Amino acid sequence: MRPMADPHPKRPGARKLRVVALSSAAIATVYAIGWGATRPGASSDDQLVRLLPGQERPARSGLRPPVPPGRYTDGTWTGAASNAYGRVEVAVRIQGGRITAAAITRTTTFYPASFIAALPAQVVERQSADLDVVSTATASWQDFVDAVQRALTTAAGRPLPPARGGS
Amino acid sequence: VIGAARWHEVWMDTVVTVQLAVPAGAAPRYQAAARRAFGWFARVEAACSRFDPASEVCGLLRRVGEPVRASPILFESVAVALELAEATGGAFDPAVGHLLEGRGYNRHYRTGRTARSGIDPSARPSFQDVELDRDTGTIVLRRPVLLDLGAVAKGLAVDLAAEQLARLAPGVVVDAGGDCVVRGATMTGRPWRVGIRHPLQPGRLLTAVELAAGAVCTSGGYARRGRGPLQAGHLIDARSGRAAEGIVSATVVAPTAMAADALSTAALLLGPTDGPRLLQASGVEGLLVTADLEQIATAGFSALVVDAPRSPGPVPA
Protein backbone atom coordinates (compact mmCIF):
# COMPACT_ATOMS: atom_id res chain seq x y z
CA MET A 1 0.00 0.00 0.00
CA ARG A 2 1.55 3.29 -1.07
CA PRO A 3 1.02 6.21 1.32
CA MET A 4 0.25 9.59 -0.10
CA ALA A 5 3.38 11.67 -0.24
CA ASP A 6 2.11 15.21 -0.35
CA PRO A 7 0.81 16.40 3.02
CA HIS A 8 -0.27 19.72 1.58
CA PRO A 9 -2.01 18.83 -1.62
CA LYS A 10 -2.84 21.34 -4.23
CA ARG A 11 -6.54 21.60 -3.93
CA PRO A 12 -8.52 21.16 -7.09
CA GLY A 13 -10.14 24.51 -7.71
CA ALA A 14 -8.11 26.04 -4.85
CA ARG A 15 -11.11 26.44 -2.59
CA LYS A 16 -12.16 25.05 0.72
CA LEU A 17 -13.78 21.68 0.19
CA ARG A 18 -17.08 21.44 1.97
CA VAL A 19 -18.57 18.20 0.71
CA VAL A 20 -18.46 16.55 4.14
CA ALA A 21 -19.90 19.55 5.99
CA LEU A 22 -22.62 20.08 3.40
CA SER A 23 -23.63 16.44 3.49
CA SER A 24 -23.89 16.46 7.28
CA ALA A 25 -26.03 19.59 7.09
CA ALA A 26 -28.15 18.00 4.37
CA ILE A 27 -28.94 14.98 6.50
CA ALA A 28 -29.73 17.10 9.52
CA THR A 29 -32.02 19.33 7.47
CA VAL A 30 -33.94 16.57 5.77
CA TYR A 31 -34.21 14.53 8.92
CA ALA A 32 -35.32 17.48 11.03
CA ILE A 33 -38.08 18.34 8.61
CA GLY A 34 -39.26 14.77 8.55
CA TRP A 35 -39.10 14.71 12.31
CA GLY A 36 -40.99 17.94 12.71
CA ALA A 37 -43.81 16.86 10.47
CA THR A 38 -44.62 13.73 12.40
CA ARG A 39 -47.73 13.18 14.42
CA PRO A 40 -47.67 14.69 17.88
CA GLY A 41 -47.14 12.13 20.57
CA ALA A 42 -45.61 9.57 18.29
CA SER A 43 -42.84 7.71 20.01
CA SER A 44 -39.38 8.11 18.62
CA ASP A 45 -39.44 4.68 17.04
CA ASP A 46 -42.80 5.30 15.45
CA GLN A 47 -42.06 8.27 13.30
CA LEU A 48 -43.91 8.83 10.10
CA VAL A 49 -41.43 10.82 8.16
CA ARG A 50 -42.97 13.18 5.65
CA LEU A 51 -41.83 15.67 3.13
CA LEU A 52 -43.31 19.14 3.13
CA PRO A 53 -47.04 19.27 2.42
CA GLY A 54 -47.78 18.81 -1.22
CA GLN A 55 -44.38 17.41 -1.94
CA GLU A 56 -44.97 13.84 -1.06
CA ARG A 57 -45.19 11.65 -4.08
CA PRO A 58 -46.28 8.09 -4.38
CA ALA A 59 -43.07 6.13 -4.61
CA ARG A 60 -44.50 3.57 -6.95
CA SER A 61 -46.69 5.55 -9.24
CA GLY A 62 -47.19 4.46 -12.77
CA LEU A 63 -46.07 0.88 -12.33
CA ARG A 64 -47.56 -1.48 -14.81
CA PRO A 65 -46.74 -5.00 -15.78
CA PRO A 66 -44.58 -5.18 -18.89
CA VAL A 67 -47.33 -7.22 -20.52
CA PRO A 68 -50.95 -6.76 -19.45
CA PRO A 69 -52.18 -9.71 -17.36
CA GLY A 70 -54.50 -12.11 -19.11
CA ARG A 71 -52.74 -11.75 -22.45
CA TYR A 72 -50.14 -14.43 -21.99
CA THR A 73 -50.07 -17.44 -24.26
CA ASP A 74 -50.57 -20.78 -22.54
CA GLY A 75 -47.54 -22.95 -22.16
CA THR A 76 -44.28 -23.05 -20.30
CA TRP A 77 -41.84 -20.34 -21.24
CA THR A 78 -38.32 -19.64 -20.26
CA GLY A 79 -36.09 -16.61 -20.04
CA ALA A 80 -32.54 -15.94 -18.96
CA ALA A 81 -30.32 -13.04 -18.12
CA SER A 82 -26.87 -12.49 -16.81
CA ASN A 83 -24.47 -9.86 -15.66
CA ALA A 84 -21.07 -9.76 -14.03
CA TYR A 85 -22.45 -11.52 -10.99
CA GLY A 86 -23.80 -14.56 -12.75
CA ARG A 87 -26.68 -15.97 -14.70
CA VAL A 88 -30.27 -16.77 -13.85
CA GLU A 89 -32.69 -18.88 -15.87
CA VAL A 90 -36.37 -18.99 -15.13
CA ALA A 91 -39.45 -20.82 -16.32
CA VAL A 92 -42.96 -19.41 -16.26
CA ARG A 93 -46.07 -21.50 -16.74
CA ILE A 94 -49.12 -19.85 -18.28
CA GLN A 95 -52.53 -21.48 -18.01
CA GLY A 96 -55.69 -19.80 -19.18
CA GLY A 97 -53.69 -16.67 -19.96
CA ARG A 98 -52.47 -16.29 -16.42
CA ILE A 99 -49.20 -17.03 -14.68
CA THR A 100 -49.74 -20.12 -12.59
CA ALA A 101 -46.15 -20.94 -11.72
CA ALA A 102 -42.70 -19.47 -11.91
CA ALA A 103 -39.42 -21.03 -10.93
CA ILE A 104 -35.72 -20.46 -11.07
CA THR A 105 -34.48 -23.34 -13.18
CA ARG A 106 -30.82 -22.59 -13.01
CA THR A 107 -28.57 -20.09 -11.37
CA THR A 108 -24.86 -19.58 -11.42
CA THR A 109 -24.80 -16.42 -9.39
CA PHE A 110 -21.99 -15.55 -7.09
CA TYR A 111 -24.52 -14.88 -4.36
CA PRO A 112 -26.39 -17.60 -2.50
CA ALA A 113 -29.39 -18.75 -4.50
CA SER A 114 -31.43 -18.43 -1.33
CA PHE A 115 -31.26 -14.67 -1.77
CA ILE A 116 -33.56 -14.87 -4.76
CA ALA A 117 -35.54 -17.95 -3.82
CA ALA A 118 -38.58 -15.95 -2.77
CA LEU A 119 -38.98 -14.14 -6.07
CA PRO A 120 -40.92 -16.68 -8.16
CA ALA A 121 -43.83 -16.81 -5.75
CA GLN A 122 -44.10 -13.06 -5.95
CA VAL A 123 -44.18 -13.17 -9.72
CA VAL A 124 -47.18 -15.47 -9.59
CA GLU A 125 -48.83 -13.33 -6.98
CA ARG A 126 -48.38 -10.13 -8.92
CA GLN A 127 -48.80 -11.60 -12.40
CA SER A 128 -45.68 -9.91 -13.70
CA ALA A 129 -42.01 -9.42 -13.03
CA ASP A 130 -42.73 -5.91 -11.98
CA LEU A 131 -42.18 -6.43 -8.27
CA ASP A 132 -42.55 -3.64 -5.80
CA VAL A 133 -40.59 -4.96 -2.91
CA VAL A 134 -38.61 -8.08 -2.41
CA SER A 135 -37.15 -8.86 0.93
CA THR A 136 -34.07 -10.76 -0.16
CA ALA A 137 -31.99 -10.35 -3.25
CA THR A 138 -28.80 -8.85 -4.38
CA ALA A 139 -27.31 -8.14 -7.79
CA SER A 140 -29.25 -11.14 -9.01
CA TRP A 141 -32.38 -9.12 -8.57
CA GLN A 142 -32.05 -7.42 -11.92
CA ASP A 143 -31.03 -10.64 -13.60
CA PHE A 144 -34.15 -12.26 -12.36
CA VAL A 145 -36.42 -9.44 -13.41
CA ASP A 146 -34.79 -9.46 -16.85
CA ALA A 147 -35.21 -13.19 -17.11
CA VAL A 148 -38.83 -13.19 -16.09
CA GLN A 149 -39.66 -10.27 -18.34
CA ARG A 150 -38.12 -12.04 -21.27
CA ALA A 151 -40.06 -15.18 -20.45
CA LEU A 152 -43.26 -13.21 -20.14
CA THR A 153 -42.68 -11.40 -23.37
CA THR A 154 -42.18 -14.70 -25.15
CA ALA A 155 -45.30 -16.01 -23.51
CA ALA A 156 -47.28 -13.07 -24.82
CA GLY A 157 -46.20 -13.87 -28.36
CA ARG A 158 -44.14 -10.75 -28.69
CA PRO A 159 -40.63 -10.59 -30.06
CA LEU A 160 -37.91 -10.94 -27.47
CA PRO A 161 -36.34 -7.66 -26.43
CA PRO A 162 -32.62 -7.49 -27.06
CA ALA A 163 -30.49 -8.67 -24.19
CA ARG A 164 -29.16 -5.62 -22.50
CA GLY A 165 -25.95 -4.76 -20.74
CA GLY A 166 -23.54 -7.13 -19.13
CA SER A 167 -22.16 -10.29 -20.50
CA VAL B 1 -22.65 -11.26 13.11
CA ILE B 2 -24.25 -13.89 15.25
CA GLY B 3 -27.82 -13.34 16.26
CA ALA B 4 -28.27 -9.89 14.78
CA ALA B 5 -31.59 -8.96 13.24
CA ARG B 6 -31.48 -8.28 9.50
CA TRP B 7 -33.85 -7.13 6.81
CA HIS B 8 -33.35 -6.80 3.05
CA GLU B 9 -35.25 -4.85 0.46
CA VAL B 10 -34.50 -3.86 -3.11
CA TRP B 11 -34.22 -0.14 -3.70
CA MET B 12 -32.22 1.99 -6.12
CA ASP B 13 -31.35 -1.03 -8.22
CA THR B 14 -29.54 -2.68 -5.38
CA VAL B 15 -30.12 -4.65 -2.25
CA VAL B 16 -30.49 -2.59 0.88
CA THR B 17 -29.70 -4.39 4.10
CA VAL B 18 -30.52 -3.18 7.57
CA GLN B 19 -28.79 -4.90 10.44
CA LEU B 20 -29.47 -4.12 14.08
CA ALA B 21 -27.38 -5.27 17.01
CA VAL B 22 -30.33 -6.79 18.78
CA PRO B 23 -31.00 -10.49 19.27
CA ALA B 24 -32.60 -12.13 16.25
CA GLY B 25 -35.43 -13.14 18.55
CA ALA B 26 -36.24 -9.48 19.09
CA ALA B 27 -36.49 -8.81 15.37
CA PRO B 28 -40.31 -8.73 15.26
CA ARG B 29 -40.29 -5.77 17.63
CA TYR B 30 -38.04 -3.86 15.23
CA GLN B 31 -39.79 -4.93 12.06
CA ALA B 32 -41.93 -1.81 11.69
CA ALA B 33 -39.01 0.50 12.38
CA ALA B 34 -36.89 -1.28 9.80
CA ARG B 35 -39.64 -0.92 7.21
CA ARG B 36 -39.90 2.77 7.95
CA ALA B 37 -36.16 3.09 7.53
CA PHE B 38 -36.52 1.57 4.05
CA GLY B 39 -39.16 4.24 3.46
CA TRP B 40 -36.38 6.80 3.16
CA PHE B 41 -35.19 5.03 0.04
CA ALA B 42 -38.64 5.35 -1.50
CA ARG B 43 -38.72 9.05 -0.68
CA VAL B 44 -35.26 9.76 -1.99
CA GLU B 45 -36.05 7.81 -5.16
CA ALA B 46 -39.28 9.74 -5.67
CA ALA B 47 -37.31 12.97 -5.41
CA CYS B 48 -34.05 12.13 -7.15
CA SER B 49 -34.43 9.26 -9.62
CA ARG B 50 -33.72 10.24 -13.21
CA PHE B 51 -35.11 6.85 -14.25
CA ASP B 52 -38.62 7.75 -13.15
CA PRO B 53 -40.41 10.38 -15.27
CA ALA B 54 -42.70 11.05 -12.29
CA SER B 55 -39.80 11.94 -10.02
CA GLU B 56 -39.25 15.45 -8.79
CA VAL B 57 -35.89 15.76 -10.55
CA CYS B 58 -37.43 14.79 -13.90
CA GLY B 59 -40.17 17.31 -13.21
CA LEU B 60 -37.57 20.09 -13.26
CA LEU B 61 -37.07 19.41 -16.95
CA ARG B 62 -40.65 20.38 -17.65
CA ARG B 63 -40.10 23.81 -16.10
CA VAL B 64 -36.79 24.93 -17.53
CA GLY B 65 -36.00 28.58 -16.81
CA GLU B 66 -38.29 29.04 -13.83
CA PRO B 67 -37.65 28.66 -10.11
CA VAL B 68 -39.12 25.39 -8.92
CA ARG B 69 -39.70 24.81 -5.23
CA ALA B 70 -37.90 21.64 -4.30
CA SER B 71 -38.33 19.16 -1.49
CA PRO B 72 -35.51 19.22 1.05
CA ILE B 73 -34.34 15.85 -0.24
CA LEU B 74 -33.93 17.09 -3.80
CA PHE B 75 -32.60 20.49 -2.80
CA GLU B 76 -29.90 19.13 -0.49
CA SER B 77 -28.93 16.41 -2.95
CA VAL B 78 -28.43 18.96 -5.69
CA ALA B 79 -26.54 21.24 -3.30
CA VAL B 80 -24.01 18.54 -2.46
CA ALA B 81 -23.72 17.47 -6.11
CA LEU B 82 -22.98 21.05 -7.18
CA GLU B 83 -20.40 21.43 -4.42
CA LEU B 84 -18.70 18.26 -5.61
CA ALA B 85 -18.75 19.54 -9.17
CA GLU B 86 -17.01 22.72 -8.04
CA ALA B 87 -14.51 20.78 -5.97
CA THR B 88 -13.52 18.60 -8.92
CA GLY B 89 -13.34 21.40 -11.44
CA GLY B 90 -16.23 19.85 -13.29
CA ALA B 91 -14.79 16.35 -13.65
CA PHE B 92 -17.77 15.23 -11.64
CA ASP B 93 -20.86 16.86 -13.05
CA PRO B 94 -24.44 15.87 -12.27
CA ALA B 95 -25.53 17.37 -15.61
CA VAL B 96 -24.47 14.24 -17.52
CA GLY B 97 -27.77 12.40 -17.09
CA HIS B 98 -28.55 12.59 -20.79
CA LEU B 99 -25.12 11.19 -21.68
CA LEU B 100 -25.73 8.22 -19.39
CA GLU B 101 -29.12 7.76 -21.03
CA GLY B 102 -27.39 7.66 -24.37
CA ARG B 103 -25.11 4.91 -23.08
CA GLY B 104 -28.06 2.79 -22.12
CA TYR B 105 -28.16 3.58 -18.43
CA ASN B 106 -31.75 4.59 -18.70
CA ARG B 107 -33.89 1.69 -17.65
CA HIS B 108 -35.84 1.81 -14.44
CA TYR B 109 -34.87 -1.22 -12.42
CA ARG B 110 -38.36 -1.76 -11.08
CA THR B 111 -40.65 -0.93 -13.98
CA GLY B 112 -38.27 -2.04 -16.72
CA ARG B 113 -39.22 1.09 -18.60
CA THR B 114 -36.78 3.19 -20.54
CA ALA B 115 -36.56 6.83 -19.60
CA ARG B 116 -36.01 9.52 -22.22
CA SER B 117 -35.26 13.09 -21.31
CA GLY B 118 -35.38 14.28 -24.90
CA ILE B 119 -32.16 16.25 -24.43
CA ASP B 120 -30.01 16.35 -27.53
CA PRO B 121 -27.13 13.89 -27.02
CA SER B 122 -24.71 16.46 -28.44
CA ALA B 123 -25.77 19.09 -25.90
CA ARG B 124 -23.24 19.81 -23.18
CA PRO B 125 -25.10 21.34 -20.28
CA SER B 126 -23.09 21.66 -17.08
CA PHE B 127 -23.63 22.09 -13.37
CA GLN B 128 -23.27 25.81 -13.95
CA ASP B 129 -26.64 25.73 -15.66
CA VAL B 130 -28.23 24.79 -12.35
CA GLU B 131 -28.98 27.47 -9.76
CA LEU B 132 -30.02 26.99 -6.17
CA ASP B 133 -31.65 29.57 -3.96
CA ARG B 134 -31.52 28.48 -0.35
CA ASP B 135 -33.74 31.32 0.84
CA THR B 136 -36.64 30.24 -1.31
CA GLY B 137 -35.74 26.55 -1.54
CA THR B 138 -35.94 26.70 -5.30
CA ILE B 139 -33.97 25.24 -8.19
CA VAL B 140 -33.68 26.82 -11.61
CA LEU B 141 -32.45 24.98 -14.68
CA ARG B 142 -31.07 27.56 -17.06
CA ARG B 143 -31.00 24.97 -19.84
CA PRO B 144 -32.52 21.51 -20.14
CA VAL B 145 -30.46 19.39 -17.74
CA LEU B 146 -31.12 15.83 -16.69
CA LEU B 147 -29.50 15.70 -13.28
CA ASP B 148 -27.86 12.42 -12.34
CA LEU B 149 -27.84 12.39 -8.56
CA GLY B 150 -26.67 8.81 -8.27
CA ALA B 151 -23.48 9.79 -6.45
CA VAL B 152 -25.28 11.57 -3.64
CA ALA B 153 -28.88 10.38 -3.38
CA LYS B 154 -28.26 6.77 -2.40
CA GLY B 155 -25.86 7.89 0.30
CA LEU B 156 -28.42 10.34 1.61
CA ALA B 157 -31.01 7.59 1.90
CA VAL B 158 -28.54 5.36 3.73
CA ASP B 159 -27.68 8.19 6.12
CA LEU B 160 -31.32 8.98 6.83
CA ALA B 161 -32.19 5.35 7.45
CA ALA B 162 -29.20 4.95 9.78
CA GLU B 163 -30.05 8.18 11.59
CA GLN B 164 -33.52 6.87 12.31
CA LEU B 165 -32.43 3.41 13.41
CA ALA B 166 -29.56 4.63 15.58
CA ARG B 167 -32.16 6.05 17.93
CA LEU B 168 -33.57 2.58 18.49
CA ALA B 169 -30.76 0.10 18.63
CA PRO B 170 -27.30 0.05 20.21
CA GLY B 171 -25.76 -0.89 16.90
CA VAL B 172 -26.88 -0.30 13.32
CA VAL B 173 -25.63 -1.10 9.84
CA VAL B 174 -27.37 0.15 6.73
CA ASP B 175 -25.79 -1.12 3.55
CA ALA B 176 -26.93 -0.37 0.01
CA GLY B 177 -24.77 -1.89 -2.66
CA GLY B 178 -21.53 -0.15 -1.83
CA ASP B 179 -22.78 2.55 0.52
CA CYS B 180 -22.57 1.52 4.13
CA VAL B 181 -23.18 3.38 7.37
CA VAL B 182 -22.39 1.90 10.76
CA ARG B 183 -23.32 3.18 14.21
CA GLY B 184 -22.61 1.81 17.64
CA ALA B 185 -21.30 -1.69 18.11
CA THR B 186 -22.02 -5.27 17.20
CA MET B 187 -23.80 -7.74 19.47
CA THR B 188 -20.45 -8.64 21.00
CA GLY B 189 -19.65 -5.01 21.68
CA ARG B 190 -16.85 -4.53 19.20
CA PRO B 191 -16.88 -1.88 16.48
CA TRP B 192 -18.37 -2.84 13.14
CA ARG B 193 -16.02 -4.26 10.56
CA VAL B 194 -16.56 -3.41 6.94
CA GLY B 195 -14.91 -5.49 4.30
CA ILE B 196 -13.75 -3.81 1.12
CA ARG B 197 -14.30 -5.94 -1.91
CA HIS B 198 -11.51 -6.77 -4.26
CA PRO B 199 -12.40 -5.04 -7.54
CA LEU B 200 -11.45 -7.95 -9.75
CA GLN B 201 -11.84 -11.09 -7.69
CA PRO B 202 -15.38 -11.78 -6.53
CA GLY B 203 -15.55 -13.09 -3.01
CA ARG B 204 -12.15 -11.73 -2.05
CA LEU B 205 -11.60 -8.76 0.16
CA LEU B 206 -8.91 -6.16 -0.35
CA THR B 207 -8.92 -5.34 3.31
CA ALA B 208 -11.32 -4.51 6.08
CA VAL B 209 -11.79 -1.49 8.28
CA GLU B 210 -13.26 -1.15 11.73
CA LEU B 211 -15.24 1.87 12.88
CA ALA B 212 -17.77 2.75 15.54
CA ALA B 213 -19.57 5.39 13.54
CA GLY B 214 -19.25 6.57 10.01
CA ALA B 215 -19.70 5.60 6.43
CA VAL B 216 -17.74 3.50 3.99
CA CYS B 217 -18.42 3.69 0.30
CA THR B 218 -16.72 1.91 -2.54
CA SER B 219 -17.16 3.11 -6.10
CA GLY B 220 -15.96 1.10 -9.01
CA GLY B 221 -16.80 0.29 -12.54
CA TYR B 222 -17.15 -3.34 -11.64
CA ALA B 223 -20.27 -2.82 -9.58
CA ARG B 224 -22.52 -1.95 -12.49
CA ARG B 225 -22.86 -3.50 -15.84
CA GLY B 226 -20.48 -2.02 -18.34
CA ARG B 227 -18.52 -3.37 -21.25
CA GLY B 228 -15.91 -4.99 -19.08
CA PRO B 229 -14.90 -5.34 -15.48
CA LEU B 230 -12.50 -2.41 -15.60
CA GLN B 231 -14.73 0.10 -17.29
CA ALA B 232 -16.72 2.41 -15.12
CA GLY B 233 -19.28 2.95 -17.84
CA HIS B 234 -21.70 4.75 -15.56
CA LEU B 235 -19.09 7.19 -14.30
CA ILE B 236 -18.34 9.83 -16.87
CA ASP B 237 -15.64 12.48 -16.64
CA ALA B 238 -17.68 15.44 -17.76
CA ARG B 239 -14.60 17.27 -18.97
CA SER B 240 -13.87 14.63 -21.61
CA GLY B 241 -17.28 12.95 -21.84
CA ARG B 242 -15.47 9.64 -21.43
CA ALA B 243 -15.72 6.90 -18.88
CA ALA B 244 -13.36 7.15 -15.93
CA GLU B 245 -9.99 5.47 -16.29
CA GLY B 246 -6.99 4.82 -14.10
CA ILE B 247 -8.79 3.88 -10.89
CA VAL B 248 -10.84 0.69 -10.70
CA SER B 249 -11.94 0.97 -7.11
CA ALA B 250 -12.22 3.95 -4.77
CA THR B 251 -13.17 3.47 -1.14
CA VAL B 252 -13.83 6.42 1.14
CA VAL B 253 -14.45 6.49 4.87
CA ALA B 254 -16.33 9.64 5.85
CA PRO B 255 -18.79 10.84 8.47
CA THR B 256 -21.72 10.41 6.07
CA ALA B 257 -22.53 8.00 3.27
CA MET B 258 -23.50 10.97 1.16
CA ALA B 259 -19.98 12.37 1.39
CA ALA B 260 -18.33 8.96 1.17
CA ASP B 261 -20.20 8.10 -2.03
CA ALA B 262 -19.74 11.54 -3.55
CA LEU B 263 -16.01 11.64 -2.82
CA SER B 264 -15.32 8.05 -3.86
CA THR B 265 -17.10 8.71 -7.14
CA ALA B 266 -15.12 11.90 -7.61
CA ALA B 267 -11.80 10.25 -6.74
CA LEU B 268 -12.50 7.57 -9.31
CA LEU B 269 -13.12 10.25 -11.91
CA LEU B 270 -10.08 12.34 -10.99
CA GLY B 271 -7.68 9.44 -11.20
CA PRO B 272 -4.58 8.37 -9.28
CA THR B 273 -3.02 11.83 -8.96
CA ASP B 274 -5.84 14.25 -8.22
CA GLY B 275 -8.15 11.69 -6.61
CA PRO B 276 -6.03 11.27 -3.48
CA ARG B 277 -5.60 15.03 -3.25
CA LEU B 278 -9.34 15.52 -3.26
CA LEU B 279 -9.74 13.05 -0.41
CA GLN B 280 -7.04 14.70 1.68
CA ALA B 281 -8.37 18.19 1.03
CA SER B 282 -11.82 17.01 2.05
CA GLY B 283 -10.57 15.56 5.31
CA VAL B 284 -11.60 11.96 4.66
CA GLU B 285 -9.72 8.68 4.51
CA GLY B 286 -9.64 6.47 1.50
CA LEU B 287 -8.11 3.62 -0.43
CA LEU B 288 -7.78 3.76 -4.21
CA VAL B 289 -6.87 0.86 -6.45
CA THR B 290 -5.36 1.60 -9.82
CA ALA B 291 -5.92 -0.40 -12.98
CA ASP B 292 -2.65 -2.24 -12.34
CA LEU B 293 -3.82 -3.00 -8.80
CA GLU B 294 -1.57 -0.57 -7.01
CA GLN B 295 -3.16 0.55 -3.74
CA ILE B 296 -3.00 4.21 -2.74
CA ALA B 297 -4.19 5.08 0.76
CA THR B 298 -4.66 8.32 2.64
CA ALA B 299 -2.39 8.89 5.64
CA GLY B 300 -4.97 7.90 8.22
CA PHE B 301 -6.45 4.94 6.42
CA SER B 302 -4.16 2.29 7.82
CA ALA B 303 -5.28 3.18 11.35
CA LEU B 304 -8.76 1.93 10.41
CA VAL B 305 -7.62 -1.36 8.94
CA VAL B 306 -8.20 -4.54 10.86
CA ASP B 307 -5.92 -7.44 10.08
CA ALA B 308 -7.38 -10.69 8.87
CA PRO B 309 -10.90 -10.17 10.13
CA ARG B 310 -12.59 -13.40 11.05
CA SER B 311 -15.93 -12.05 9.95
CA PRO B 312 -15.83 -9.67 7.03
CA GLY B 313 -19.08 -8.03 8.04
CA PRO B 314 -21.04 -6.13 5.45
CA VAL B 315 -19.22 -6.12 2.16
CA PRO B 316 -19.81 -3.17 -0.14
CA ALA B 317 -20.81 -4.62 -3.47
Image: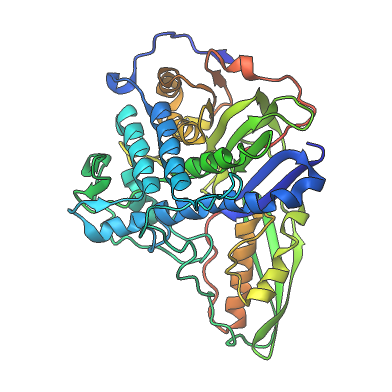
Residue A123 in the figure: left or right of residue A12? right
Residue B183 in the figure: left or right of residue B83? right
Q: Position of residue B100 (x, y in %)?
A: 39, 51
Question: What is the residue that sits farthest to the front in this orientation?
Answer: A41
Asked if residue B14 can be seen in this view, the reply is no
Foreground residue among B28 and B313: B28
Q: Position of residue B315 (x, y in %)?
A: 67, 37
Q: How many marks?
A: 0
Residue B105 sits in which quadrant? bottom left
Q: Position of residue B260 (x, y in %)?
A: 50, 31
Foreground residue among B37 and B116: B37
For the C terminus of chain B, the quadrant is top right
* On screen, residue B248 above or below B222: above
Q: Position of residue B221 (x, y in %)?
A: 52, 40
Residue sitting at 45 percent across and 22 percent down? B279
Question: What is the residue that sits farthest to the bottom in this orientation?
Answer: A96
Residue B218 sits in which quadrant? top right
For the N terminus of chain B, the quadrant is top right
Residue B207 in the figure: left or right of residue B52? right
Asked if residue B37 can be seen in this view, the reply is yes
Residue sitting at 68 percent across and 69 percent down? A122
Which coloring applies here? rainbow
Foreground residue among B193 and A78: B193
* On screen, residue B212 above or below B34: above
* On screen, residue A45 above or below B117: above
Residue B257 in the figure: left or right of residue A108? left
